[in-house]
Amino acid sequence: MSIHLLEGTLQIDIFYECEDQDLDDNICISIVERCAPAEKLLRAGETNLYLTLQEARQLGEALLTAAKHSESAYKD
């Protein structure tokens, strides 16, 4: 799954890393930044974060909770 943020300069890919199936942290969040050096948020052009199943679920739940709060505030 690819998500493009910040007018397409930040690409986030989230996937299960099959080659690391024997490791607990086999869910990868890959962040690729394509912009001018002065606009960079990250030091590296590409960063990979590996999460465990529990961490991935916590992150997903936190994002959904924040989205629900945002949606509620938007409707008011």
Image (spheres, rainbow, N blue to C red):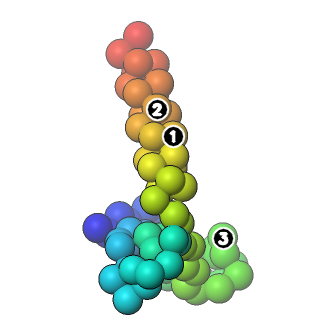
Q: Residue at x 51, y 46 (%)?
A: 58
SS label for mark 3: loop
Quadrant of the drawing holding the C terminus? top left
Q: Nearer the viewer, mark 1 or mark 3?
A: 1
Instruction: Determine which residue is flagged by label 1.
Output: 62
- Marks 2/3 in contact by CB < 8 Å: the verdict is no
Q: Is residue 8 visible?
A: no
Identify residue type, mark 3: Leu
Instruction: Determine which residue is flagged by label 2.
Output: 65
Instruction: Using the image as rendered, state which of residue 46 and residue 21 is in the foreground.
Output: 21
Q: Which of the two labelled residues, at mark 2 and mark 3, occupies the earlier sequence position?
A: 3
Instruction: Using the image as rendered, state which of residue 14 and residue 24 is in the foreground.
Output: 24
Q: Residue at x 55, y 84 (%)?
A: 46
SS label for mark 1: helix
The residue furthest left is 1
Near mark 2 (Cα within 10 A), the count class, few <14, some 14-19 or many ≥20, is few
Quadrant of the drawing holding the N terminus? bottom left
Identify residue type, mark 1: Ala
Could you give the CA–CA distance between mark 2 and mark 3, rounded to whole angstroms? 25 Å
Q: Quadrant of residue 13?
A: bottom left
Image height check: is 62 above or below 13?
Answer: above
Instruction: Determine which residue is flagged by label 3.
Output: 41
